[in-house]
Each structure stands twice: as C-alpha cells, then as structure tokens.
Image (tube, coloured by chain):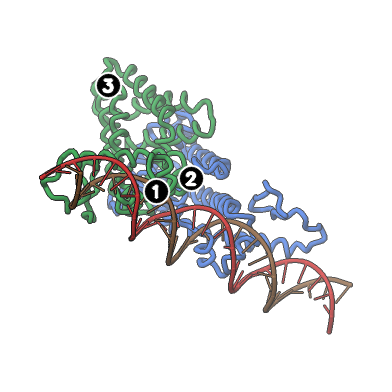
Chain colours: A green, B blue, C brown, D red
Amino acid sequence: MADPEDEGPTVTSTTDRTDRISRRQVDKFEERRRQLADAALQTLSELGYARTSLREIAQNSDFSHGVLHYYFRDKVELITYCVRQYKATCVLRYDSIAATAAEPGALAAAFGDGLAATLVSDALMHRLWYDLRSQSLFEESFRADVAEIDSSLERMIWRIVTAYSGLVGAPPSCTSAFAYAAFDGLFQQALLRHLSGSEDALDDLRAGARSLLPRLV
Amino acid sequence: MADPEDEGPTVTSTTDRTDRISRRQVDKFEERRRQLADAALQTLSELGYARTSLREIAQNSDFSHGVLHYYFRDKVELITYCVRQYKATCVLRYDSIAATAAEPGALAAAFGDGLAATLVSDALMHRLWYDLRSQSLFEESFRADVAEIDSSLERMIWRIVTAYSGLVGAPPSCTSAFAYAAFDGLFQQALLRHLSGSEDALDDLRAGARSLLPRLV
DNA sequence: ACGATCTCTGGACAGTCGTCAAGACAATCC
DNA sequence: GGATTGTCTTGACGACTGTCCAGAGATCGT
C-alpha cells in the first residue's frame, strides 16, 4: 500500500490515494502521524531505543497499539519518521541561541548560556539523540537521517563560529567539522555528568563553551 | 548465592565457598567468566546492546545458553562484567599511544596516528563503547562503571596533554575534562564517518588531533 | 438516510526473550 | 570402588515482541 521509500514527514506514504481526495483528509493523516511520532519520541526519550516497544508507545498516546501499523508500515518506518521529526525541533532549538551579539565575549557567553539552558530543559531529548546516533552505527536504516541531522547541527555550530570570528575580525582557524566535533564532545560530556547528578556540569559547560570559541579563530 | 554487589572481574561473586577450596577451582571459575565475557563482548560489538540476546552470546561461545546463568546471576551482571573487562583492554590500548616523543610536533603527530590506528583496528569495539555509554544514561546499573572508564580515559588524554605542554614549555590552558571532551568529540565524529564509509575520516582525525593539541596549552 | 470509505480496536499469531530447573556428564575426594 | 561436588545441556515456563486481521465506529459524499 505504501511506497517503500517514501517516508518524509511532509508527504504521506500512501500512493494509491486518488488525487480527488480532499486535502483535509491528507492533512489529517499527516497530522496523526505527527501525533503518534510525538508519543513515540516521548517514550523513546524516557526509555531509550532498546527498551521502547510499540505497545508502550501506544500507551503514551490516545490510541491502541494496532493503529501504529495503520499509519506506519513497520517499526523502522516509525522510528525513522521520529528521527526526522526530531530534527525539526532540534534545529529550531539550537538556532534560537545567541542570535545577536555585538561583542565576542557577549556572543560566547550567550552561546554557553544557551547550550546550558537546552541541556537542562531538553535533557531527555538530547539523551535520546545520542542513543539514536549510536543505534545508527548498527542499524543502517537510520544512518542517512542521523547523518543529515548531524550535518545540520554542524552548520548551526559553524554559524556561531563564523559570527564570533566576524566580531573579533579574524577568520576561523579550523574546519566546521572540527568545531562541531569539539562542541559536541563538550555538550555530550556535560549531559552525561548532568544526568548523573553532577552540580558542576552546567557551569563547566558554560565555561567550556566560552573557552572553546576563542580557540577556534 | 552471590553477593549482590560483588562483581569485580578479579573476584568471584560467590561468597559461600569455603576457604579450603582449591585456588585452581576459583581460577577456573574466573577464567570461564572471562571467556564468556569475551564472547559477549564480541556479540555486543557486532550487534549492539539492543539486539544482543543471551542465546546469541552463547552461540558465539563454546557453550549453550544455560551456562550463562551458572556464571552470571542475570543479564545485567553479565553486561556489567563485560563493561569492566572492556575497560582493561581499553585503557591499555590507549596508553600505548605516543609513549615517547622529543618534540611537540612529533608527539601530536604520533598521537593523531595512534588515534587513527585504533579507530580503524578496533572500530567495532569503539562503536560498542559509545553504545554502552548511551545505554548508561538509561540503565542506571551501568552508570558507575561507565563513568569510571570515562574518567580513566580522561586521565589518559590528560597525560598526553601534559606531556605536550611539557615539551612546549607552557602549562595547559584548559581543564582535563575540557581536553577529554574535545578529543572524545573528535574521535566519535571520526568513528561515525569512518563507519559510514567516508575516506577522509582518518585523515581528518589525524589532522584534527594535531590541530587540537596546540589549542589546549 | 444510506452506502462507501476512513479510522480505530482488540485479539490472535508466531517468535524471541530472560530465567530457571531437572538431569547428564566429568572431575575429585574419601 | 562409591559418593560428592562442580560443570554443562536441554527443555520448559511465562512474558513480551512486531505484525497482522476481522470487524466495530466514525465520517463522509451523495
């Protein structure tokens, strides 16, 4: 019934729908997919990939477990859809950080504060991200989507770095991949320690970000 | 039968053994635990935590699945034991990198080469490490052991950094946590791209490591 | 109002999972 | 020698998994 490789969040996966179908129906179909993916993302962020079952996802939604196979071909398509949906919220979240700053120090401080803020407010989602990124190393089906999110995060970091380098009046002294890897390591380590109950994790992340930016120009 | 919190790799978990028991028996018991843990580590590194079952582990060993519960109380104890056993090989592997160098540039190059070498030769084990570290964010049982490995890796990185700073004659300009986070991010990103088939991953890791060290002093 | 289509439920299925226990085999001790 | 203990296999159990399906409700066009 569904095109085997059409799973984009903005396109329905059924190809046998006639064109005369009302747009409202299609929208409703897509909206329900998003709704179920939300429930799935919540469950995944609570339990992790290894412990999340379709029945558990359905229990976190308003529906029964059978409906998942009405809107998604199988578990892989559901998770893939979730990953893509996660990307949207993910990029937005990061992009609102440190939008405008007139001075290098202020930008670095704002960026550090922003990282620390999203780390604490969306800790479970970040935890899920690192879980899914690890899973993508085993499940090849996830790899492409995960890589796409990774590169969009890399571009986000690069915008911060170039903005910073513009303020200090010197070009960046590293590649964007290098900058992203360093910030990602910093963030992941902070998340690890934060979720383990460390009090210093947030402050260290702020200080780390402020300290890292000058080293990249 | 077993002390609920005694699972160290060098100590048997049975406390009701009388002291008159022959050392040979105890050693044999421990050796078999190591042997089974090896099979488990191999399976884990191939399939990942989420897809590894006890039966699959047993099939990668010379025994049947029932024996696992003779040597380990349950799955958690087996995995925990595996994590601790992994640590041993892990630290050794890293510590053999860049042992001696008389000049900063040579040290940085040797370290970069060492990282790239272990990334390619032990790619599956590194993949497993990042998987297990993610799992520890969900399974609290693994958290302590994972944190211990993490901090031992941090010390290893710090030895490299201080050695480098000694050669250039200036103290490090960052904390050891910062240095580890940055290198770990670099390494993880390189592993991701290497396992995805990227040709540049290894060269970028070597260049990244050479470029990162000078930024830390 | 009625038939057609979309949506959703709940149960069933074939596997697989971790766990356990009864018993076979082997080594050891008196 | 027999008896005891350590080691390992085999098969079973209940629970859980992803998947599918028959059919009930809901919604829609006409």
Give whichever of A82, A183 is nearer the camera: A82
Same-chain status of marks 2 and 1:
no
Residue contact at pointers 2 and 1, CB within 8 angstroms: no
Q: Amino acid at mark 3?
A: Ala
Viewed as shown, does residue A12 lie left or right of B167? Answer: left
- As helix, strand or loop, the secondary structure at mark 2 comes to helix
Circles 1 and 3 in contact, beta carbons < 8 Å: no
Q: Which mark is residue A65?
A: 1
What residue is pinned by disc 2?
Answer: B135
Distance from disc 1 to disc 3, alpha carbons, whole Å, reads 42 Å
Q: Chain of mark 2?
A: B
Mark 3, secondary structure of its residue = loop
Seen at 18% across and 38% down, the residue is A24
Q: Is residue B186 above or below residue B8?
A: above
* Mark 1 or mark 3, earlier in chain: 1
Q: Residue at x 63, y 53 (%)?
A: B9
Q: Amino acid at mark 1?
A: His
Q: Residues within 10 Å of mark 2 (few under 14, many from 20)?
A: many
The front one of C19 and A203 is C19
- For mark 1, give the secondary structure: helix
**Mark 1 or 3, closer to the camera:** 1
Q: Chain of mark 1?
A: A
So how many labels did they put on this image?
3
Q: Position of residue B108 (x, y in %)?
A: 40, 41
Q: Which residue is mark 3?
A: A99
Viewport quadrant of the N terminus of chain B: bottom right
Quarter of the image where one finds residue A210: top left
Quarter residue B75 falls in: bottom right
Left or right? Give the position of B83 relative to A55.
right
The image position of residue B18, as x and y in percent, is 81, 58
Q: Position of residue A160 (x, y in %)?
A: 28, 27
In the rendered image, residue A33, in percent from the top left (x then y), is placed at 29, 42
